[in-house]
Amino acid sequence: MNKKTLLLILGLALASMAFADLGFFASFNSRETLKVFTSQYIADKPPAPDFWDTLIVLTSFQPNRQEFLVFGNIIKGENVLIENGMWQTKKYTLGMGFGKVLTIPVRLTRIGLDFSLDFSAGPYFHMFLSNHYTHVSGQYTKEVEEASILQRVQYGLYSTVRLRLTHYKKYFNVVDFNLGLHFFMPFSNHEFNNDIAARYHLFKTFAFAGISF
């Protein structure tokens, strides 16, 4: 992709943000599942690693239209099995996504509140801005610590379910309060993998809270 094409995409994204709702969200809980895919089976990869993730998302969305998001993730992992060795990892990521939004209005008549329920999904990619590894035990593989620029890029599909409290915005033009779930389904290997017969994908689900205006 040349510079002119990249600038055109960024320009269109910024233009769409000017006529859309903006949201800022941060995760308060996360769940990660490491799966191994082979031609014979799909299963969890034992032993299960321990991860602590913090996801921060800036999104520009138009109800029932489209969504453009920029996100960062702070990742800390322990007991991560890579190439028969046990590692501790710490990563900082930056990514982008673009999806379609479906919005359903919800009204709770008994308490007189109006909500909007947004479903969005689309492709995403992100890059590890930095990788820090500490070898703990087992086989040491030097290539794990020397990921190339292509191995730092992750991609796949994301989906979001977001509930927005919109009742007061029509009266006072204030922000909407949001709660939701954000899910990443990767198509790329989670870490360095020299096994051509297996792929390792790390699925992530985040519970988040935030505001939109």
Image (cartoon, rainbow, N blue to C red):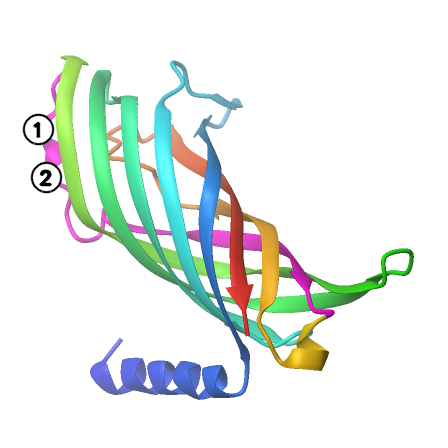
Q: Nearer the viewer, residue 78 or 54?
A: 54
Residue 122 tag number = none
| Residue 13 horizontal side relative to residue 83, left or right | right
Q: Position of residue 20 (x, y in %)?
A: 55, 81
State the SS at label 2.
Answer: loop
Task: Answer few, some or many: residues within 10 Å of disc 2's Cα (few below 14, many 20 plus, some between 14 and 19).
Answer: few
| Residue 19 horizontal side relative to residue 81, left or right | right
- Reply yes or no: does residue 164 show up in magenta: yes
The relative height of residue 92 versus residue 86 in the rendered view (above or below) is below
Residue occupying the point 48% across, 21% down: 44
Residue occupying the point 29% across, 80% down: 6
- Reply yes or no: does residue 50 show up in magenta: no
Under mark 2, the amino acid is Glu
Q: Are marks 2 and 1 in contact (CB under 8 Å)?
A: yes
Residue occupying the point 60% across, 51% down: 180
Under mark 1, the amino acid is Lys
Residue under circle 1? 142
State the SS at label 1.
Answer: helix
Residue 146 tag number = 2
Q: Position of residue 167 (x, y in %)?
A: 74, 69
Q: Position of residue 196 (x, y in %)?
A: 31, 31
Residue occupying the point 23% across, 22% down: 83
Outermost residue on the top side: it is: 138
Task: Answer few, some or many: residues within 10 Å of disc 1's Cα (few below 14, many 20 plus, some between 14 and 19).
Answer: few
The relative height of residue 168 versus residue 158 in the rendered view (above or below) is below
**How many circles with numbers are drawn on the protein?**
2
Outermost residue on the front side: it is: 172
Locate residue 57: give its quadrant: bottom left
Locate residue 7: give its quadrant: bottom left
| Residue 13 horizontal side relative to residue 205, left or right | left
Q: Which residues are magenta?
A: 139-167
Locate residue 77: give its quadrant: top left
